[in-house]
């Protein structure tokens, strides 16, 4: 599966890893595997998908993002549940997701109107611990997306990077 992702600053990945320690029965994201998906692109030829994405990024400028709260999906649309995550706020990210949904088929239940920009902390574990973590206050982290990457989730690697502005 390929996706277009926003690279994360180390401050966000460190926060996610630190918070995961409070969910001992959950499966935390391994170091270096935290992602922020803009849009899933499907499977097939990664280079071809990257070229197709490039056609739709011509006027995308760097944009601001912010993490300021922990949240959860008690029942995930895919994969193990519950899911603890850092909620990501960015109107520009949402607009880019919507634009790409008109060119790449949205995945039912997790994209289009159901899209929740987030960085997964952990999956599984007991619901009481997940709820306590979601009630925790965290310091806000702001950053600017200055590039996007087409990501190959099966091989855990970048296929192509796009510097912003395009």
Image (cartoon, rainbow, N blue to C red):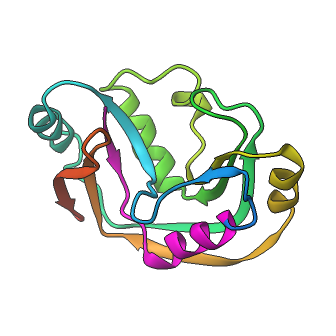
Residue lying at the far front in this picture: please name it: 25
Query: Within the image, what quadrant is residue 110 found in?
Result: top right
Q: Residue shown at 46%/45% (left/top)?
A: 95
Q: Residue shown at 23%/64% (left/top)?
A: 165
Q: Magenta span covers which residues?
A: 1-20
Viewer-proximal residue among 113 and 1: 1
Q: Give the image location of residue 64, x and y in percent.
A: 47, 68
Q: Is residue 4 magenta?
A: yes
Q: Is residue 131 magenta?
A: no
Query: Within the image, what quadrant is residue 18 found in?
Result: bottom right
In this image, 115 relative to 100: left or right? Answer: right
Q: Give the image location of residue 85, x and y in percent.
A: 65, 54
In this image, 151 relative to 37: left or right? Answer: left
Viewer-proximal residue among 140 and 25: 25
Q: Is residue 160 positioned above or below 141 on the image?
A: above
Residue 75 at least partly seen: yes
Q: Is residue 96 positioned above or below 74 on the image?
A: below
């Amino acid at each position: 599966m390929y996706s277009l992702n926003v690279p994360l600053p180390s401050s966000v990945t460190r926060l996610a890893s630190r918070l995961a320690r409070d969910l001992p029965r959950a499966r935390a994201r391994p170091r270096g595997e935290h992602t922020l998906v803009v849009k899933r692109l499907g499977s097939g030829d990664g280079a071809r998908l990257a070229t197709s994405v490039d056609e739709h990024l011509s006027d995308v400028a760097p944009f601001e993002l912010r993490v300021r709260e922990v949240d959860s999906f008690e029942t995930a649309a895919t994969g193990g549940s519950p899911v603890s995550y850092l909620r990501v706020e960015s109107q520009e990210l949402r607009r880019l997701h919507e634009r790409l949904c008109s060119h790449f088929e949205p995945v039912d239940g997790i994209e289009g109107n159901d899209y929740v920009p987030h960085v997964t902390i952990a999956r599984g574990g007991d619901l009481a611990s997940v709820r306590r973590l979601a009630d925790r206050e965290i310091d806000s982290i702001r950053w600017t997306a200055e590039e996007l990457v087409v990501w190959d989730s099966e091989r855990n690697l970048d296929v192509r990077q796009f510097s912003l502005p395009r």
